[in-house]
């Protein structure tokens, strides 16, 4: 399939003009006009100028194709050299970036683990302290009531209480005391 070039329209116009010059030259031969040779020369000049334009276009196309091929070759070589020279640097930069990222992830994991252990230990310590405080407070209040009750009757009663507790099992002694006090209640209040 032939492609249409810009010269196809120009060729048609040049052919039309040449025919007009040839007709004019033929008419000038009949009248023995001295311009007949000039008319034929102008027709030949038109053909020659068209050929010169076609040759110029062909040489420009060839130069463009050669230039594009050279540019492609130069670009290929430049790309190869760039990859050859920059490749190791890019690989090193990627490796450094990856190592830095890995270190950052490790540090975050360690800090996160340490924070979790610290939070867990704080919670355990808080619960232990709260339980110990509540138990100690209750025990302290009981002891304070006992001491208060023992010293309410005077120093001799407190000594007797200390001896009673030292010589006896406190649970059994308390049980005996409760029975005795229950037995004495009706007598004390007249029941």
Image: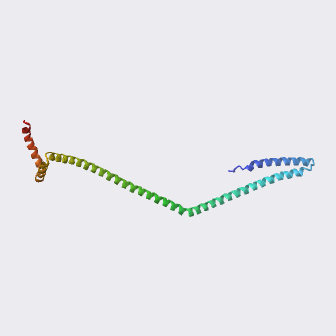
In this rendering, is residue 114 above or below 30? below
Q: Quadrant of the C terminus?
A: top left
> Residue 58 at x, y = what percent?
73, 56
Q: Residue at x 73, y 57 (%)?
A: 59
> Residue 163 at x, y = what percent?
11, 52
Q: Decide which of 102, 160 is in the foreground and name it.
A: 160
Q: Decide which of 36, 74 is in the foreground and name it.
A: 74
Q: Decide which of 148, 177 is in the foreground and name it.
A: 148
Q: Is residue 144 left or right of residue 6?
A: left
Furthest-right residue in this view: 32
Q: Is residue 166 left or right of residue 123?
A: left
Q: Is residue 113 left or right of residue 8?
A: left
In this rendering, is residue 93 above or below 164? below
In this rendering, is residue 141 above or below 190? below
> Residue 134 at x, y = what percent?
24, 47
Numbered circles on residues, count: 0
Q: Residue at x 83, y 53 (%)?
A: 45
Q: Decide which of 25, 5 is in the foreground and name it.
A: 5
Q: Is residue 38 left or right of residue 124?
A: right
Q: Residue at x 23, y 47 (%)?
A: 137
> Residue 114 at x, y = what percent?
36, 55
């Amino acid at each position: 399939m032939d492609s249409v070039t810009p010269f196809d329209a120009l060729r048609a116009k040049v052919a039309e003009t040449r025919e007009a010059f040839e007709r004019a030259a033929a008419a000038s031969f009949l009248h023995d006009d001295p311009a007949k040779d000039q008319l034929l020369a102008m027709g030949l000049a038109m053909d020659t100028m068209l050929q010169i334009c076609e040759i110029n276009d062909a040489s420009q196309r060839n130069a463009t194709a050669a230039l594009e091929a050279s540019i492609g070759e130069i670009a290929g070589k430049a790309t190869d050299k760039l990859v050859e020279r920059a490749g190791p640097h890019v690989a090193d930069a990627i490796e450094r970036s990856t190592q830095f990222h890995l270190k950052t992830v490790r540090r975050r994991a360690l800090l996160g683990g340490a924070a979790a252990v610290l939070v867990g230990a704080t919670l355990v310590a808080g619960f232990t302290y709260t339980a110990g405080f509540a138990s100690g407070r209750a025990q302290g209040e009981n002891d304070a009531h006992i001491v208060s009750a023992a010293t309410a009757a005077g120093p001799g009663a407190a000594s007797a209480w200390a001896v009673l507790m030292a010589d006896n099992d406190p649970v059994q002694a308390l049980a005996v005391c409760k029975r005795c006090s229950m037995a004495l209640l009706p007598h004390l209040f007249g029941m």
